[in-house]
């Protein structure tokens, strides 16, 4: 008995698989989940999840249900893929980013339409007492920050730089860095990172 030939997905199906994979990857990163953690939550292997995210697999519907469960979303959301053609990001339509050490009463939003360009710009609000010293960041690229209100301390390899409204800073992201808000009010700042690190 011969095996039936595998059917290659049509161009449209291939585009949908790529879009769904990108959506899964975006949602996973927004939630601060590693491939390993999503594997634990969904019951799928890291290899399968990686292939799905890269549009290299044609997953069964049950696999998508498992992924949706792991991401804590309705499965239908995986198929709601927005095609953003405008270069403008409206204030009420910013994409919320839910990690990087921001407490639940803080805010971290993407100001660029997507992460496909050479830089990433984010709107960051951190509450009094915010402190990321327990998990210093270090990655390739360069960062620039501008404080709009409040106060933030930026630590570069342990050296503190206090920024107040109107102050800005630029540094290589390869230097271990972390942030604190020592003031009595929320600090609002705009950060530019190149290349995008999310």
Image (tube, rainbow, N blue to C red):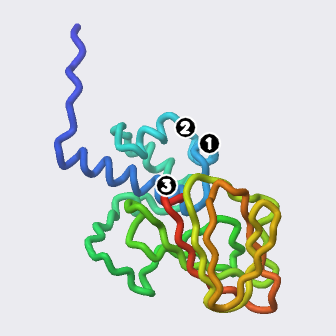
Mark 1 element type: helix
Residue at which label 2 appears: 46
Residue 128, located in which quarter of the rendered image? bottom right
Residue that protrudes farthest toward the top in the picture: 1
Residue 68 got which mark? Answer: 3
Q: Residue at x 38, y 80 (%)?
A: 89
Q: Nearer the viewer, residue 100 or 93?
A: 100
Residue at which label 1 appears: 36
Q: Earlier in the sequence, mark 2 or mark 3?
A: 2
How packed mark 2 is, by other alpha carbons closer than 10 Å (few <14, some 14-19, many 20 or more), is some
Left or right: 102 as drawn, with respect to 145: right
Q: Residue at x 47, y 40 (%)?
A: 50
Q: Nearer the viewer, residue 14 or 142?
A: 142
Image coordinates for residue 67, horizontal then vertical, percent: 50, 49
Q: Residue at x 42, y 46 (%)?
A: 53
Residue 155, located in which quarter of the rendered image? bottom right
Q: Quadrant of the N terminus?
A: top left
Q: Is the Cβ of the residue at disc 1 closer than 8 Å to that at disc 3?
A: no
Image coordinates for residue 76, horizontal then vertical, percent: 38, 61
Mark 2 element type: helix
Q: Is the Cβ of the residue at disc 2 closer than 8 Å to that at disc 1?
A: yes
């Amino acid at each position: 008995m011969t095996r039936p030939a595998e059917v290659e997905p049509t161009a449209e199906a291939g585009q949908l698989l790529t879009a769904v994979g990108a959506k899964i990857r975006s949602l996973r990163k927004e939630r601060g989940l590693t491939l390993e953690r999503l594997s634990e939550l969904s019951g799928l292997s890291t290899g399968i999840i990686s292939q799905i995210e890269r549009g290299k697999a044609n997953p069964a519907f049950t696999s998508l249900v498992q992924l949706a469960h792991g991401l804590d979303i309705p499965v239908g959301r995986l198929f709601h893929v927005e095609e953003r053609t405008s270069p403008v990001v409206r204030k009420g339509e910013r994409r919320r980013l839910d990690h990087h050490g921001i407490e639940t009463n803080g805010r971290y939003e993407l100001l660029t339409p997507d992460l496909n360009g050479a830089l990433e710009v984010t709107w960051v609000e951190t509450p009094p007492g915010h402190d990321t010293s327990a998990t210093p960041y270090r990655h390739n690229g360069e960062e620039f920050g501008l404080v709009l209100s409040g106060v933030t301390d930026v630590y570069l390899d342990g050296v503190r730089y206090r920024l107040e409204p109107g102050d800005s800073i630029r540094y290589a992201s390869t230097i271990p860095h972390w942030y604190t808000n020592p003031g009595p009010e929320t600090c609002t700042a705009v950060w530019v990172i190149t290349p995008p690190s999310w």
